[in-house]
Amino acid sequence: MAAAGLAERFSEVRRQLPASTQLLAVSKGQPSERIREAVAEGQRSFGESRLQEAITKQEELADLVGLLPPLDWHFIGRLQANKARGVVRRFGTIHSVDSLGLAERLARIAGEEGLSPAVFFQVKLRPDPSKTGFEPEELREA
């Protein structure tokens, strides 16, 4: 898609959102050049679900580091415990923390790294064995 098409799409989406809404562009599977196009349109928050793909993009976009406001990277999707340190180092926000063990691991690593990522807990509101996340009562107890 040409930059003009992307600009039109961002403009249309923003017109439909309340001014206080922060738009998270899911950039997983998109090349760095598409992210550059979105940045040129004012987008700053991007969601990725694969650590290695995100690292490559962040390195390719390193020249954008001095932007104000800076790029805001969100890890979305299921986080494997063995990727926790890399995610803490590379993302300011971590979505879908689905267990107390993972939350504790992230907190320990964040402390060791001197970082404070925002964390969102995944809560199962319906009994579905194919889904992960905290049961509401389990989260209250934790």
Image (cartoon, grey):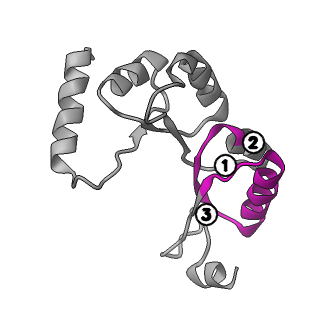
- The residue located at (22%, 25%) in the rendering is 7
Find residue 83 and name its label: 2
Which of the marked residues, 3 or 1, is nearer the chain's N terminus?
1
| Region of the chain picked out in magenta, as a range | 89-118
Q: Name the residue that disc number 3 marks.
A: 132
Front disc: 3 or 2: 2
Which of the marked residues, 3 or 2, is nearer the chain's N terminus?
2
Q: Name the residue that disc number 1 marks.
A: 79
Q: What is the secondary structure assignment of the residue under circle 3?
A: loop
Looking at the image, do the residues carrying marks 3 and 1 touch, with CB atoms under 8 Å apart? Answer: no
- The residue located at (42%, 24%) in the rendering is 35
For the C terminus, the quadrant is bottom right
Mark 1: few/some/many CA within 10 Å (<14, 14-19, 20+): some
Q: Is residue 43 left or right of residue 16?
A: right
At label 2, which amino acid type do we have? Lys
Q: What is the secondary structure assignment of the residue under circle 1?
A: loop
Find residue 107 and name its label: none
At label 3, which amino acid type do we have? Thr
Q: Is residue 110 magenta?
A: yes
Q: Is residue 114 left or right of residue 26?
A: right
